[in-house]
Image (cartoon, helix red, strand yellow):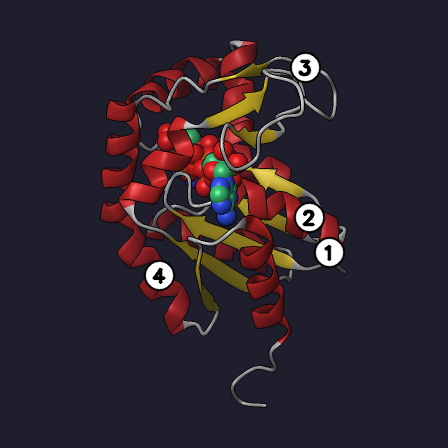
């Protein structure tokens, strides 16, 4: 049975980047809610049509749609969840879903960054249209301009990485995060990590904290 982790953090805090690294390290799949939603939009499904409007405005997609989509993706074995839960109600739904499968979360990792870092990271982000690999023009540039190192796909700017939308996403994050963090810290499941360091340092810090014995040890 694999590791079951959740990554929480502001837009651009590095959830996707760290989820990919943790997924490789622990050999469990990364489940990215943002990617699942973008696929629904690209495929033009009924939920996708509703989702598109929320994502373009930087608002949270209604919980009902989110919970339905996530239920289909989580089998209770190992996973690295990126971008879900994002509010208290989603956190409670996830616990219920896992209990129904006789499972629980191992840890919730909160990646802490400020608004300045968020804007710097998201305005330089590029994403492979084909495989979803992440790049940054300054800190993680591709070998060839606008071409993915892994699959040679085209690199694009995400629709919601415009400055006004980034600020709205940040406000939404601030509004929801406190309830989420309180919920997980009360259950002793929270790990907080300063995420304004390069990605390898953040990753090493997460791994070292995950390996620490529990407080009651
Ligand atoms: P989603 O796609 O999840 O976006 P987000 O949460 O805003 O997070 P990002 O993907 O922008 O950033 P990230 O933290 O993954 O950072 P990344 O690793 O890419 O969600 C999009 C939208 O979908 C939401 O706004 C909402 O509308 C909807 N949605 C999603 N989940 C939902 C839910 N549960 N409920 C309701 N609605 C939901 O890194 C960013 C950049 O920084 C990259 O360029 C990367 O290369 C670079 N970088 C990363 N780490 C470092 C580092 N340590 N140092 C330097 N650069 C770094």
First in residue order: circle 4 vs circle 2:
2
| Residue highlighted by disc 4 | 181
Q: Does the residue labelled 4 lie within 8 Å of ligand 1?
A: no
Residue 150: x percent and y percent? 74, 26
Instruction: Using the image, tell me which numbered label, if any, was put on residue 153.
Output: 3
First in residue order: circle 4 vs circle 1:
1
Mark 3 vs mark 1: give the one in front.
3
Instruction: Using the image, tell me which numbered label, if any, was put on residue 23.
Output: 2
Q: What distance separates the C-alpha of mark 2 from that of mark 1?
A: 5 Å
Q: Looking at the image, in which quadrant does ligand 1 appear?
A: top left
How packed is label 4: few (under 14 Cα within 10 Å), some, or many (20 or more)? many
Q: What distance separates the C-alpha of mark 3 from that of mark 4?
A: 37 Å
How packed is label 3: few (under 14 Cα within 10 Å), some, or many (20 or more)? some
Q: What distance separates the C-alpha of mark 3 from that of mark 1?
A: 27 Å
The quadrant of the rendering that contains the N terminus is bottom right
Element under disc 1: helix
Looking at the image, the residue that sits furthest to the bottom is: 217
**Is 188 drawn above or below residue 127 in the view shown?**
below
User: In percent of the image, x 33 and y 16: which residue is there?
Assistant: 53
Instruction: Using the image, tell me which numbered label, if any, was put on residue 26.
Output: 1
First in residue order: circle 3 vs circle 4:
3
User: In percent of the image, x 72 and y 16: which residue is there?
Assistant: 152
Mark 4 vs mark 2: give the one in front.
2
Looking at the image, the residue that sits furthest to the top is: 44
First in residue order: circle 3 vs circle 2:
2
Q: What distance separates the C-alpha of mark 3 from that of mark 2?
A: 22 Å
């Amino acid at each position: 049975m694999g590791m079951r982790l959740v990554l929480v953090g502001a837009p651009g805090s590095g959830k996707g980047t760290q989820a990919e690294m943790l997924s490789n390290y622990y050999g469990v799949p990364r489940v990215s809610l943002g990617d699942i939603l973008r696929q629904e939009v690209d495929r033009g499904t009924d939920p996708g049509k509703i989702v598109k409007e929320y994502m373009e405005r930087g608002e949270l997609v209604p919980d009902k749609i989110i919970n339905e989509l996530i239920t289909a993706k989580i089998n209770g074995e190992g996973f690295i969840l990126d971008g879900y839960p994002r509010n208290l109600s989603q956190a409670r739904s996830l616990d219920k879903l896992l209990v129904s499968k006789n499972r629980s979360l191992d840890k919730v990792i909160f990646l802490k960054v400020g608004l300045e870092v968020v804007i710097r990271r998201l305005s330089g982000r590029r994403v492979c249209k084909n495989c979803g690999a992440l790049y940054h023009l300054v800190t993680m540039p591709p070998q060839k301009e606008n071409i993915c190192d892994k699959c040679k796909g085209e690199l694009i700017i995400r629709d919601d990485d415009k400055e006004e939308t980034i600020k709205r996403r940040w406000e939404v994050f601030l509004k929801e995060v406190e309830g989420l963090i309180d919920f997980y810290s009360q259950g002793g499941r929270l790990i907080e990590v300063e995420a304004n360091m390069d990605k390898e340092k953040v990753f090493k810090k997460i791994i070292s904290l995950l390996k620490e014995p529990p407080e009651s040890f």
